[in-house]
Image: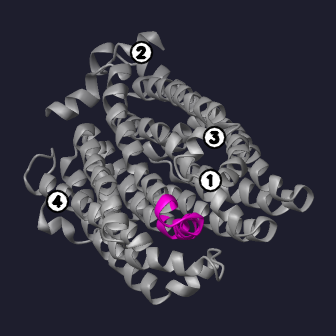
């Protein structure tokens, strides 16, 4: 048993969760800085219409990230469970398949995106005023799709094998490059919004190279074999089945933003799209540590479940949920207490700052509950229960938020859009609890069955006594 596998098998859940989650949370925040930094420099270098342009582009970027997460989370679940079951060969096959899927689908997205860029942008809400800005940015960003998908997917697998530090550095390298290159291309080379896109693609390429070096240098617990690049239908099917929930959640977010952009344009015009762009970037950034906790939690839950250490699985669910709720609560307080200061990072337009602060406070009203929702959805992915994860991934965006965005503004105009978010979050939390309770009962039953077996034949962890 190698060092990483031994750590996942035997280290205390609390310290293990911190060890895997902290680097992931830092990395996720740095990763989120791509959009935040772009918006800051575009807002100050191009203006409100520049922010509106990248807001229109964001749903397309979400689709690219959705593909990356589908491959990455699906393969990561296979890898963590396979390593837990001492099946290294299957884990390496999932790794090789993820290489092929990432590169193949990334190339397809680039070609199709460039061919249909104008109709795509109009579908996602670009008005005649915003379209030139959105096209300048997206026509460059699409060339980085391969690097985005490869980087996000492979980094999920790095975390699945327990190497959170490498995963953190992957995101740090790209994000720090983006922060340095943005002002150079926007202001130094006078390239405006297109310069922000070029900086982002160069940064994504850097993470692509970093991950290639990591896996080809033999530093991973797994090895890369050319024979594993050939698609294994059973591996690919399981990858897509498990990762489908993340894909649907992200694509649902993309669909939601497209609908939202049209609703915003109808009730508030181009400036309303700009306001949402600022709110969305701030809210997403503040939530990133919560997703980092989920990423640290996934390999623990998946490994423990695959190894039939159900006591550790259950304890990891409890600790991850509590931690995520606390972190989300901290983000909620920051947004509620300092909305004007946060918005001022993007613009000096006092009118825009005032119009954005109140929607920001409304949208984040139920933020603490999102931490719980993220952990529950991740749990079902980690233990390989694709159906439950799929339903929960659809809940917030498709089942609740889109209908609310379409209905409430008819009665409350533009404020109805903002109030749709906390209502949808609350309803999704309730549904998540309904799904979690029966699963906890099943884990309790399995733990009890194992305790009834002869002690010498069962690996018993210290946490069993606590539970």
Q: Residues within 10 Å of mark 3 (few under 14, many from 20)?
A: some
The range drawn in magenta is 43-61
On the image, the x and y values in percent for residue 254 come to 58, 65
Check the image and tell me how it is coloured.
Answer: one colour
Q: In the drawing, does residue 235 fall left or right of residue 346?
A: left
Label 3 sits on residue: 340
**Closer to the N terminus: mark 3 or mark 2?**
3
**Closer to the N terminus: mark 2 or mark 1?**
1
Q: Nearer the viewer, residue 306 or 430?
A: 430
Q: Residues within 10 Å of mark 4 (few under 14, many from 20)?
A: some
Label 1 sits on residue: 391
**Closer to the N terminus: mark 1 or mark 3?**
3
Label 4 sits on residue: 212
Distance between mark 2 and mark 1 Cα atoms = 31 Å
Question: Residue 432's quadrant in the figure?
Answer: top right
Question: What's the residue at 42%, 71% (across, down)?
Answer: 192
Judged by depth in the image, the label closer to the viewer, 4 or 3, is 3
Residue 414 on the magenta segment: no
Label 2 sits on residue: 464
Distance between mark 4 and mark 3 Cα atoms = 42 Å
Q: Residues within 10 Å of mark 1 (few under 14, many from 20)?
A: some
On the image, the x and y values in percent for residue 103 come to 28, 72
Distance between mark 4 and mark 2 Cα atoms = 40 Å
Distance between mark 3 and mark 2 Cα atoms = 48 Å
Decide whether the magenta segment is chiefly helix, strand or loop.
helix
Q: Is residue 189 shown to the viewer in this render?
A: yes
Distance between mark 1 and mark 4 Cα atoms = 34 Å
* Secondary element at tag 2: helix
Q: In the drawing, does residue 251 fall left or right of residue 311?
A: right
């Amino acid at each position: 048993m190698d060092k990483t596998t031994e750590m996942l098998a035997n280290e205390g859940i609390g310290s293990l969760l911190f060890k895997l989650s902290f680097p992931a949370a830092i990395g996720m925040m740095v990763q989120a800085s791509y959009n935040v930094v772009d918006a800051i420099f575009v807002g100050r270098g191009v203006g409100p219409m520049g922010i509106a342009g990248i807001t229109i582009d964001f749903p397309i970027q979400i689709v690219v990230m959705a593909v990356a997460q589908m491959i990455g989370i699906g393969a990561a679940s296979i890898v963590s469970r396979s390593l837990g079951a001492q099946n290294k060969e299957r884990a390496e096959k999932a790794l090789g398949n993820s290489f092929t899927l990432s590169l193949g689908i990334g190339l397809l997205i680039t070609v199709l995106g460039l061919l249909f860029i104008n109709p795509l942008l109009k579908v996602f809400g670009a008005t005649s005023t915003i379209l030139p800005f959105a096209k300048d940015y997206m026509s460059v960003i699409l060339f980085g799709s391969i690097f985005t998908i490869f980087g996000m997917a492979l980094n999920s697998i790095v975390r699945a094998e327990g190497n959170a530090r490498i995963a953190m550095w992957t995101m740090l390298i790209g994000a720090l490059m983006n922060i340095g290159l943005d002002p150079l291309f926007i202001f130094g080379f006078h390239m405006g919004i297109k310069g922000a896109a070029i900086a982002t693609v160069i940064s994504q390429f850097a993470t692509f190279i970093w991950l290639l070096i990591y896996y080809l240098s033999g530093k991973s617990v797994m090895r890369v074999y050319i024979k594993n690049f050939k698609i294994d239908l059973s591996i690919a099917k399981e990858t897509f089945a498990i990762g489908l929930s993340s894909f649907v959640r992200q694509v649902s977010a993309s669909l939601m933003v497209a609908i939202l952009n049209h609703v915003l344009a109808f009730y508030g015009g181009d400036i309303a799209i700009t306001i949402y762009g600022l709110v969305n970037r701030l809210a997403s950034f503040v939530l990133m540590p919560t997703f980092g906790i989920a990423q640290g939690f996934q390999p623990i839950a998946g490994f423990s479940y695959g190894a039939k250490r159900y006591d550790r699985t259950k304890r990891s669910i409890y600790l991850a949920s509590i931690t995520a709720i606390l972190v989300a609560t901290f983000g909620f307080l920051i947004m509620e207490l300092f909305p004007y200061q946060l918005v001022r990072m993007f613009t000096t337009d006092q009118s825009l700052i005032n119009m954005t602060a109140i929607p920001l406070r409304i949208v984040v009203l139920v933020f603490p509950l999102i931490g719980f929702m993220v952990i529950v959805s991740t749990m079902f992915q980690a233990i390989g229960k694709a159906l439950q994860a799929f339903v929960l991934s659809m809940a917030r965006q498709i089942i609740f938020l889109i209908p609310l965005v379409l209905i409430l503004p008819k009665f409350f105009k533009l404020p109805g859009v903002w109030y749709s978010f906390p209502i949808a979050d609350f309803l999704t939390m309730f549904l998540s609890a309904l799904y979690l309770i029966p699963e906890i009962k099943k884990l309790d039953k399995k733990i009890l069955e194992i305790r009834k077996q002869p002690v010498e034949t069962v690996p018993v962890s210290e946490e069993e006594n606590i539970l």
